[in-house]
């Protein structure tokens, strides 16, 4: 096996990026959140990048890089590959700079993100849907860039992108120092390719060195987590694409060079927990967050003891959430919370078997939310897919006892999310 060669950290001009971006981006608010502060017995501040012009921080890196291209490069046009948020920042920058741009997006990208990209770019951008994952899309985009002599604007792995994202950190410290006494004890940063964590982490290490920097990834796409374990970037064989703004198979070489020094801890957040947080933020705070944007808040439960009495900043990285996904978000949340369960049940071949199941096995508040025979033409012999929603987690134990008591022949299928969603699609 050949030795892995790591790249050196390039110089970052974060203050230069801040000056370039000041007339273009929103200086988003750093808001004290009373509910979260009460819940965790600390002081929680939310950096609201969901209120950015394009509803995520990605505009910062895209504009910072594009604004430094030569007139000749701009005349030939620019290309990007993105799951959605970088695409929107790229598109907005194309329109702002009067540059022709081509946006490559994965085929499963939420329609809302595709529409927003077209809206922000207007006549300056063309959208091409290619590949199932960001990584597939990026390969196609880079080939197109070479073929047409254009400039590729990467979503994370470039010094100009990193220093643009770092301006989130500049704003946080500016605003925090006006609101209260330093220091910030913990900052929670979502990670996809690593541009935000590389930039903000590096800035904090220089200007608030006592702050603990916590990187967060979805459990189904742990590319930075695995890279830090291996001490170099690795490509994951497969990922859960649900957290589309943070699901990449391989983090960047340059972002890794910064993150390995900047991050104090790396934590994985289950997709179901992220979904629960999205619903809580909407219902309790009237804040709409996308899955990647919810990670920093979703992680607080796992740090509850460490953060008591501390000053905490959570970066809410974006709010580009397609309303068509809300049913899946609710479903994943219920499964994670232990309130939704799916079974393949082979009912006894006798009259009244289904009636007995409802009357004897189910509790008074258990609700059948799905019932479907898996063999349409042989219902008597085939199993039925049964979805049950419970009122409390504790009802599950009672249900299992009744299943055993009345000798129900079943297989539970939601212990493995991939298996479950395979049945439900």
Image (spheres, rainbow, N blue to C red):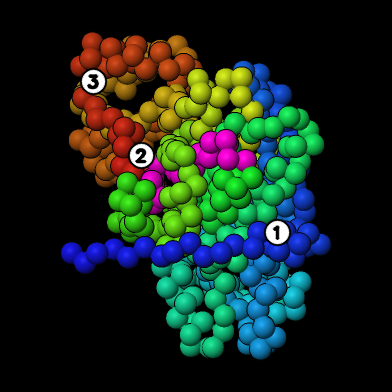
In percent of the image, x 29 and y 12: which residue is there?
402
Residue ID for mark 2: 417
The label on residue 271 is none
Q: Which residue is mark 1?
A: 15
Q: Is residue 45 above or below residue 84?
A: above
Residue 367: where, in percent of width, then height?
46, 22
Q: Nearer the viewer, mark 1 or mark 2?
A: 1
Residue at x-position 70% and y-position 69%: 93
Magenta span of residues: 208-226
Gap in angstroms between the C-alphas marked 1 and 2: 44 Å
Is 223 in the magenta? yes
Dot 2 or dot 3: first in sequence order is 3
Q: Mark 3 highlights which residue? A: 408
Q: Nearer the viewer, mark 2 or mark 3?
A: 2
Q: Quadrant of the N terminus?
A: bottom left
N-terminal-most mark, 3 or 1: 1
């Amino acid at each position: 096996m050949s030795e892995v060669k790591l790249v050196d950290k390039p110089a970052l001009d974060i203050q230069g990026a801040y000056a370039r971006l000041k007339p273009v981006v929103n200086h988003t608010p750093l808001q004290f959140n009373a509910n979260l502060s009460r819940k965790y017995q600390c002081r929680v501040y939310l950096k609201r990048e969901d209120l950015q012009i394009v509803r995520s921080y990605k505009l910062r890196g895209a504009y910072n890089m594009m604004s430094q291209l030569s007139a000749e490069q701009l005349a030939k046009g620019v290309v990007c590959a993105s799951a959605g948020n970088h695409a929107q920042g790229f598109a907005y920058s194309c329109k702002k700079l009067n540059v022709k741009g081509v946006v490559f997006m994965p085929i499963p990208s939420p329609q809302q993100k595709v529409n927003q990209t077209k809206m922000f770019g207007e006549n300056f951008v063309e959208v091409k849907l290619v590949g199932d994952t960001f990584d597939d899309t990026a390969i196609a985009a880079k080939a197109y860039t070479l073929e047409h002599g254009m400039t590729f604007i990467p979503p994370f792995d470039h010094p100009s992108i990193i220093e643009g994202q770092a301006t989130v950190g500049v704003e946080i410290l500016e605003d925090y120092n006006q609101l209260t006494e330093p220091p910030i004890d913990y900052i929670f940063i979502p990670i996809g390719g690593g541009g935000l964590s590389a930039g903000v982490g590096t800035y904090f290490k220089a200007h608030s060195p006592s702050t603990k920097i916590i990187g967060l990834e979805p459990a189904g796409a742990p590319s930075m987590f695995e890279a830090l374990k291996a001490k170099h970037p690795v490509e994951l064989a497969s990922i859960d694409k649900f957290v589309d703004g943070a699901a990449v198979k391989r983090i960047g070489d340059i972002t890794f060079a910064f993150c390995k020094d900047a991050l104090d801890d790396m934590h994985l957040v289950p997709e179901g927990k992220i979904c629960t947080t999205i619903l809580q933020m909407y219902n309790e705070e009237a804040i709409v967050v996308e899955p990647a944007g919810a990670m920093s808040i979703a992680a607080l439960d796992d740090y509850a003891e460490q953060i008591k009495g501390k000053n905490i900043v959570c970066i809410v990285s974006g709010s580009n959430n397609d309303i068509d996904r809300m049913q899946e978000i609710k479903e994943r949340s219920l499964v994670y919370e232990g309130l939704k369960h799916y079974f393949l049940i082979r009912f006894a071949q006798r009259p009244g078997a289904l009636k007995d199941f409802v009357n004897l096995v189910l509790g008074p508040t258990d609700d059948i939310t799905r019932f479907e025979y898996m063999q349409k033409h042989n219902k008597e012999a085939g199993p039925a897919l049964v979805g049950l929603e419970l009122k409390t987690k504790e009802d599950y134990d009672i249900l299992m006892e009744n299943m055993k008591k009345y000798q129900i022949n079943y297989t539970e299928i939601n212990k493995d999310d991939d298996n479950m969603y395979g049945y439900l699609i």
